[in-house]
Amino acid sequence: MYFLGLDIGSSSTKVSVVDAKSGACIAATHFPKTELAINAPQAGFAEQDPETWWSCIKSGFAELCANNDFNPQQIEAIGISYQMHGLVCVDANQQVIRPAIIWCDSRAVEIGQSAFDTIGKEKCLSALLNSPGNFTASKLKWVKDNQPDLYSKIDKMMLPGDYIAMRLTGEVTTTSSGLSEGVLWDFENGEVSQTILSHYGFESSLIPTLVPSFGDQGSVSATAAIELGLREGIKVTYRGGDQPNNAMSLNVMEPGEVAATAGTSGVVYAVTDKNAFDADSRVNTFQHVSHTDDATRNGVLLCVNGTGRLYSWVRSLLCTQGNDISYPALNAQADDVPVGSDGLVLHPFGNGAERVLQNQNIGGHMRGIDFNRHHLGHIVRGAQEGIVFALKYGFDVLKEMGVSSELVRAGKGNMFLSPIFVDAFVNSCETSVELYDTDGAEGAARGAGFGLGYYTNRAEMFKGLAIVESYQPQAERVEQYAEAYENWKQYLNL
């Protein structure tokens, strides 16, 4: 028996198959091999075609089946992880009406701020735990205001994972965890937010049918089975946004447990049993996938949009005219550069409005350049330190809220593959770090097994998940990074 995990990102789609009995990931791939394009028809816009995500799933799964020895007919359940905060609109025939407005799109910032001011800070934070901000509900309001002809055709609004579930099952559903990330969930009353629906003038019929994060979410249709080469009737049993799913993948399920990731964006995600919020909305609280009616489980999420995106941008500048430089080779350029990059400061804020900066879109910056002292290695270290320092700023907000931890779990991937990044993170945030050999697709597959009922507890669900590396803060390095952080921060007047 196998479980299939799908992780639909803005850069690529990951596909993994987990053996139910051993808990081992027996096959994994991603598609495409280069980063997916993000379309920007105007400054601050970010869109993708949902059909592209579905095509990536088909291509990735076909590659998986061709290159690995397993029987896809023995897959019993499917789990879905997906890029958060996006908006997909479909008509009554389940046809996409317009390109998806994805997570890093900034067009709805003013709409969300206006809603926050009108509804009132106290009501928004007590019931929604967030400002409406630049989230899914505000993006839908933008469509309503700016594309009324298209809005009139919408039968259902969905998050990206809801769209993939629809393509698999033919049913339009969503989860309360998903609605909370779109700021469409009322935490006080445990229901779709009537306040947001009323303020934005949305009909309640736009909201899909609710299903649990873990449990029966429909079965693979005959059409999807033919497209994918799967057996008709396989259950879809898990769905979670990429950051709640990343936390779940690392066995971060209970209060006091913290996860981090540093892919295109960088995130620190802390689980709490409280309806906690930041009065300045620099971090956001969403319902965690482990939440139940009997046990409140929320995830407080710190996000920096341009983490891996900054580093890939630096690399792309060097890979022109036929040149190619790997990330390890890039890191090697900074081996002899001291902490603080000799005063060179980079700010990783060039990928849209930043929540940790209260939805300001200030752009990326490189400051303190000395033509006689700084070389490529300084830019490499400065970029990685700048990413960590942005996360450190948000990490301190989490500490103020009382929801942080002295241990952070992360997958050994993306920026956590870099020794420079790990050293900076551990000693800047003054926290131990455990790295695991897992990813969102593998986690989604484990989630599918739990949602199916095959796994009945955490021990069974995370069998085979082991620490591959661990790091602890060092007093001397903590002091060095603290000084560099203060230099980084002074340029932002924070």
Image: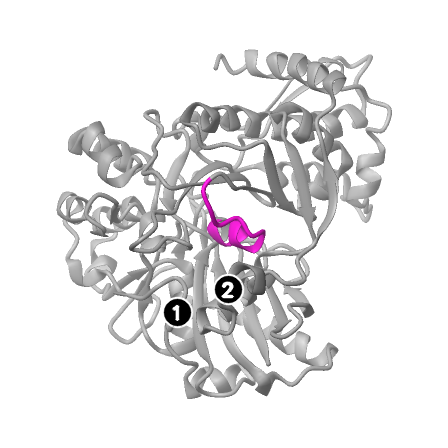
Q: Position of residue 98 (x, y in %)?
A: 35, 60
Residue at point 47% right, 46% down? 254
Please tell me whether mark 2 sits on a helix, a strand or a loop: helix
Residue at point 19% right, 33% down? 123
Towards the viewer: 187 or 219: 187
Residue at point 31% right, 67% down? 173
**Highlighted magenta segment, given as a residue range:** 244-255
Q: Position of residue 158 (x, y in %)?
A: 33, 60
The residue that label 1 is drawn on is 215
Image vertical order of residue 162 relative to residue 92, above or below: above
Instruction: Report whether residue 391 is seen.
Output: yes
Towards the viewer: 121 or 170: 121
Assess disc 2: are there few (<14), some (14-19) or many (≥20) residues with their C-alpha within 10 Å of its C-alpha.
Answer: many
Please tell me whether mark 1 sits on a helix, a strand or a loop: loop
Q: Which quadrant is the N terminus positioned in?
A: bottom right
Amino acid found under the numbered disc labelled 2: Gly
Instruction: Name the side, left or right, on which 3 lies relative to 194.
Output: right
Q: Position of residue 50 (x, y in %)?
A: 44, 64
The residue that label 2 is drawn on is 447
